[in-house]
Amino acid sequence: MAIWDPYITERDREVYALSGFGANRGFGTKPAVLVIDVNYDFVGHERRPILESAKTWSHSCGEEGWDGVEAIRRLLAGARAHSLPIFYCTSEVPRADRLGRGMWRNSRQGEKPEVPGYTGSDIVAEIAPQERDMVFRKSKPSAFFGTGLLHYLLELGVDNLIVTGTTTSGCVRASVLDAFNHNFNVSVVEEGCFDRGEVSHALNLFDMNAKYADVVGLEETLAYFDKLPAEVFPGQIMPAVQDVA
């Protein structure tokens, strides 16, 4: 049973089936992995239920976030075993004067939890970027907006973007739509995405799967990696400075 099944009416099932939505495109031949906003702001500094974690970290997705971290850790291990390009994005470090905050609809936007040793925009240590990986900082939902991500994907000849991260209904969806707009084949790893809203998570996966991406399982994706040629990107990716934008 799909994660969205409990929320989809019989009428909607019939409409989407009749309209032809949800056709699976499958994986491409030159994949890259994108990890979106898996930082302490969105999971907290330790595993706690969401209603506890959000008292300190207002954007926290709680335990679902840490489940996602473990899935992403496994996905990245598989990607690195095949020397695939890995891109991260995380939020910009906020200015003290709040300039650049934008138009977010959140009364707690800009809070800085006082947890010694942790900065909200830092990518969690369990999936920390390695030497060959590239990290972009962004101020808007999409990983493409105002960053160099598209340039690197095109230069490498990537045809399939494997997407993980948070939130499913926000930055993941925005990035998936932009990837779709640029004609990338998009695969969203279900276990590697999370959201603070259970319904938002499920229904956004449903909608992306219907129109813009294939929602795929972690094991399915790892099996796909294992079927790739030995060197998909031979000699193309050298060690990089972590923050490239």
Image (tube, rainbow, N blue to C red):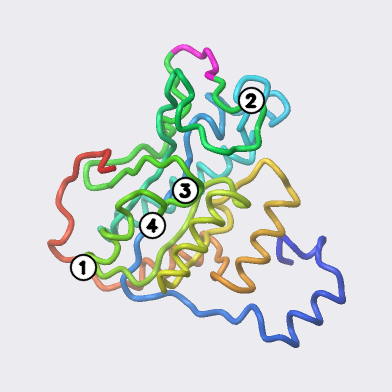
Residue beneath the point at 60% across and 82% down:
23
Tell me the amino acid under the disc marked 1: Glu
Of the image marks 3 and 2, the number of the one nearer the N terminus: 3
Q: Which residue is mark 4?
A: 33
Q: Which residue is mark 1?
A: 231
Alpha carbon of mark 3 to alpha carbon of mark 4: how far?
10 Å
Q: Which residue is mark 3?
A: 72
Mark 3 touches mark 2? (CB < 8 Å): no
Tell me the amino acid under the disc marked 4: Val
Tell me the amino acid under the disc marked 2: Arg
Segment colored magenta: 112-116
Indicate the position of residue 73 as horizontal and vertical percent values.
Answer: 44, 45
Alpha carbon of mark 2 to alpha carbon of mark 4: how far?
31 Å
- In the image, taking residue 219 as reference, residue 92 lies left or right, namely left
Alpha carbon of mark 3 to alpha carbon of mark 1: how far?
22 Å
Q: Nearer the viewer, mark 1 or mark 4?
A: 4
Q: Nearer the viewer, mark 3 or mark 4?
A: 4
Mark 3 touches mark 1? (CB < 8 Å): no
Mark 3 touches mark 4? (CB < 8 Å): no
Of the image marks 2 and 1, the number of the one nearer the N terminus: 2
Of the image marks 1 and 4, the number of the one nearer the N terminus: 4
Secondary structure beneath label 2: loop
Q: Nearer the viewer, residue 101 or 68?
A: 101
Q: Nearer the viewer, mark 2 or mark 1?
A: 2
Secondary structure mostly seen in the magenta stretch:
loop
Secondary structure beneath label 4: strand
81 lies above or below 107: below
Picture disc at residue 108: 2
Indicate the position of residue 239 as horizontal and vertical percent values.
Answer: 16, 46
